[in-house]
Amino acid sequence: MKLKTIMVLALMVVIFMSFSMLQARGEEFQGPTLTATDTIAGRYTDPSSFLTVEFPDGWTGIDYLGSPLVSPDGVLEDGGMAGWPEVSMMAVVMKRSGLEGMISDAADDESDYGCKTLSTRYVTMQGVNAIENVKECASDGNYAKSKVYIMPTQSQIAVLAYSVTSAEKYEDYLPAFEQSVQTARLDGKPVQVGSFVSRSLGLERTTYPITVAGNPVEIALESSSDISDFSFDEESKTISFTVAGSEDKKGVTIVPASWALEGPYTVMVDGRPAQDVVVISDTTSQDEQTIVRLDYSHSVHEISITGAAVAPEFPPFVAGLAAAGAIGAGLAARKVLRIT
């Protein structure tokens, strides 16, 4: 795989762009061509006026496939290998409707081309919820590491992506990228990133009643698979269930593990350590939650998630739901008593 191909993957795979999506925009991925245009630097506002961001001081660049690509060393305007910078930042704006439903294909590309997720968090920046993702890709002797912020709103999505071609350079320029991200402003209504991810992946939500430390809790799993045999064993500190689906597709299941268990977590698939697991810290809600996401090839699998300890008490957000349910049940009981 050519260097510029893996660089584009590092930038794009975490914003769920598959090869087919980029090809639809006219890119054949035989070595991307950087097009000559006016130099881009400093404050940037996209043509729709949805995103405004200040690029790092001294970073300049050009338009690449309709999006600004900047680098501390500038970006050459030829189509050769030297045209792709060793350190780069890219800003992408797209319609939300153009993204949903494409994530599964991109997940396939990610595994096929040696990409792995190093960390994922749900964060809030300037009142906008975002997905923060750090990814590493290595294939055919090429290397890329990226950090990406995906900021969805009700109508559009903004993505700010930072990428390097060597691990040594990553920390050197990361502070400049982070400072630039803090200047981003969006003209759109924020959405919950958890719901955005679930809808984009086409996951279905199923709720299961469990008891944690003597308290009733409803834990909601979101999955592209059919789930059965769900159970929570407090003594072994384990959530377990079975997933099933068509063998020609990949499966995804998201489990809000911190509703029942404290980490660190041990995740097993068919009795073996799971290979594709991401533990996500969700700081967008009032109280931080920990989510376990599993990706797997379909058929039938037995999955277990074991924590270090059972959650000692209701997380505040769960307690609020339980209190609301108790109040509702109490009101209903009073109503029944009055009728009878």
Image (spheres, helix red, strand yellow):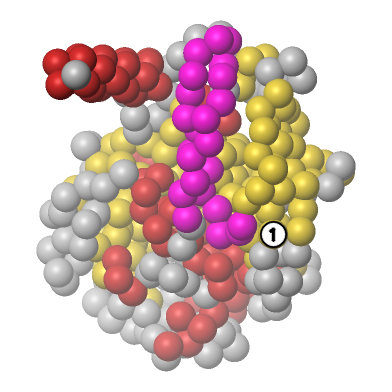
Marker count (numbered): 1
Residue 177, horizontal then vertical, whole percent: 40, 46
Viewer-closest of 264 and 167: 264
- Give the prevailing secondary structure in the magenta stretch: strand
Q: Does the magenta-highlighted stretch encompass residue 146? A: no
268 left or right of 323 in image: right
Q: Is residue 123 above or below residue 136?
A: above
Name the residue at 74% across, 15% down: 235
* Front residue of this view, candidates 177 and 237: 237
Q: Is residue 209 magenta?
A: yes
Where residue 249 appears, as percent x and y from the top left, is 66, 71
Q: Position of residue 110 (x, y in %)?
A: 63, 65
Quadrant of the image containing the N terminus: bottom right
Residue furthest toward the front? 340
Residue 337, above or below 7: above
Q: Residue 105's x, y, as percent? A: 56, 73
> In the image, what residue occupies the spot 16% across and 61% down?
50
Q: Would you say 140 lies left or right of 195 here?
A: right
Q: Quadrant of residue 181?
A: top left
Q: Is residue 114 visible?
A: no
Quarter occupied by residue 91: bottom left
**Disc 1 target residue:** 244
Q: Quadrant of the C terminus?
A: top left
Q: Amino acid at mark 1?
A: Ala
Q: Which residues are magenta?
A: 204-226
Residue found 45% across the figure and 44% down from its top: 132
Under circle 1, the secondary element is: strand
Q: Residues within 10 Å of mark 1 (few under 14, many from 20)?
A: some
Q: Residue drawn 43% across and 53% down?
A: 197
Vertical position of residue 239 compared to residue 120: above or below: above
- Can you see residue 65? yes
